[in-house]
Image: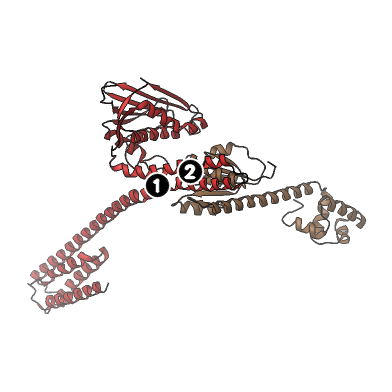
Amino acid sequence: MTETDPIVYVVDDDFSFREALDRLLRSIGYTTLCFASIDEFVRHTRADAPSCLLLDIRMPGQSSLDFQVELNKKKDGIPVIFITGHGDVPMSVRAIKNGAVGFLLKPFREQELLDVVREGINRDRSRRETEENMADLLACIKSLSQRERQILSFVNEGRSNKEIAHEIGLQEITIKVHRAKAMKKMKSKSVADLVRKLQNIDLLS
Amino acid sequence: MKKRRYVWLLLCVIASAIFVLDTIANVDISVSVLYVTLVMVVQRTGTVREILIAGSACFLLTIASYGLMPGFSLEKLDQAGLINVFISLFAIASVTYLSIKVVTSETTVRKARDQVARTMLGVSMNELATSVVHEINQPLGAIGANVAAAKRWLDTTPAEIIEARAAMDAAVRDARRAEDVISGLRRLASPSLSNRETFNLTELIRESVDIFRPEINEYRINLGMHFSQERISIDGDRTLLQQIITNVLSNAIEAMLDDKINDRTLIVTANLVAESVSIVIRDTGTGISQEHVDHIFDPFYTTKPKGLGIGLAISHSIAVAHGGSMRALPNTPHGTVISIMLPKSADKKY
């Protein structure tokens, strides 16, 4: 198993249903981990891999919907797919509002399972990518000196070296040197690239 | 709606007739008392508001016709006429008041009756349907997934025969579970002891416990089995009696899966006591509170978020059909004790 092999977590208190789901997912080629209760799942240390959670909407003990809210609060972005039965419509609506990827209505078709799990894994993949990029970017920004940050924020606003030099009261050549170093630290080859990266970030904060 | 409008029109006509008669008739004749009939007619179909309107209108009309009577003057009030008017007014007011009372109490009764009807239907039919659907869908979903998995394992090259076989075995087990739900519902009313035979109870208990080996191992449950003798003969329907035992065992195991419970012990005993056989199944699960213990053998009574609530009800009716009984008691420090009493085999050989 390589680091990026996706994992499907199954949480259902019904032994035979859980095992059946596990079998089917394994036959499709997914790595699976099954739990009989939410608590067991919480205690498990999850691997660093794209994953999704198949969760029975009716669980004894802690309610699945409350658990979903808890995950949201903890900023745990694992995509949740609810396994539901008939008569669970109001609960399902709430789950979707809270950001569930989808549902698996029992009894389900193989294709429905494939689609919803693929969707969940894909969503987790792109979430992880975004998070990674963000972490990278924050590391880059952290490596900037106070002066470099100041200069880049001017660059970000589209100001020329001359203007920046005048604004800060330094020689234009000094600005150029700082700017080149800062751009290298930000791993940006062009101003356009820098602007794109800094789209949602305030450099000076 | 149209009919109601005609009724009101008719009432207005009658009211006018009474008004005219009352006005032109002699003071001594109290025609205005007839207004009460109008109020009574309104009461039959009207609301509280409508009765109030009709009553007030009649009240005002009575006063008005007294004032309009020929020869009426404030200085020379006719005493008999005045008394007549007061009697009429009193009668109208009383009838109006009583009519309102009748209508409000009728509404209350109707509301209460609707409520009862709604809850009866709501609870029994809706919840029953939902839980039956759930209990069937659960194994159905598992069968679908298991068969789909088996197909995939067979389609791989080389085919994964062992995995496929395991999936098919599970599908067969799930199908049996669905059958059990259906036959359980059918049996609930009257367990028919069509297949009576004499058999060894300890063997049956061993078999039943074996069904739960996977769970017993998975959840690290300590298991104890004690029989007063190796052969305890019973006359009865083997399948039905096995159903009681598996049902109680599955409840016991389920009650011990709570994460707060760390001493999971299941003890199954069977003893020959005088003329009867006592089977006792003891668990250290979450137990049953006093309020539930009186109802656990009632059909459709359940404390679980899932389930029909018919398992113990069926078990109980099976035990009774065999001439036996079933009881539930709390275990110490926690858990439940279920005891099943059955008459021992009449066969003198044992």
Image chain in brown: A
Of residues B156 and A75, the one drawn nearer to the viewer in this rendering: B156
Q: Chain of mark 1?
A: B
**Residue B96 figure quarter:** bottom left
Look at mark 1 in the image and give the residue it sits on: B131
x 52%, y 43%: residue: A20
x 54%, y 51%: residue: A110
The image quadrant where one finds the N terminus of chain B is: bottom left
The image shows residue B66, relative to residue B319, as above or below, that is below
Give the Cα distance between marks 1 and 2.
Answer: 21 Å
Of residues B2 and B107, the one drawn nearer to the viewer in this rendering: B2
Q: Secondary structure at mark 2?
A: helix
Residue B282 locus on image (x, y percent): 40, 27
The image shows residue B271, relative to residue B313, as above or below, that is above
In this picture, residue A112 sits left or right of residue B198: right
Of residues B324 and B173, the one drawn nearer to the viewer in this rendering: B173
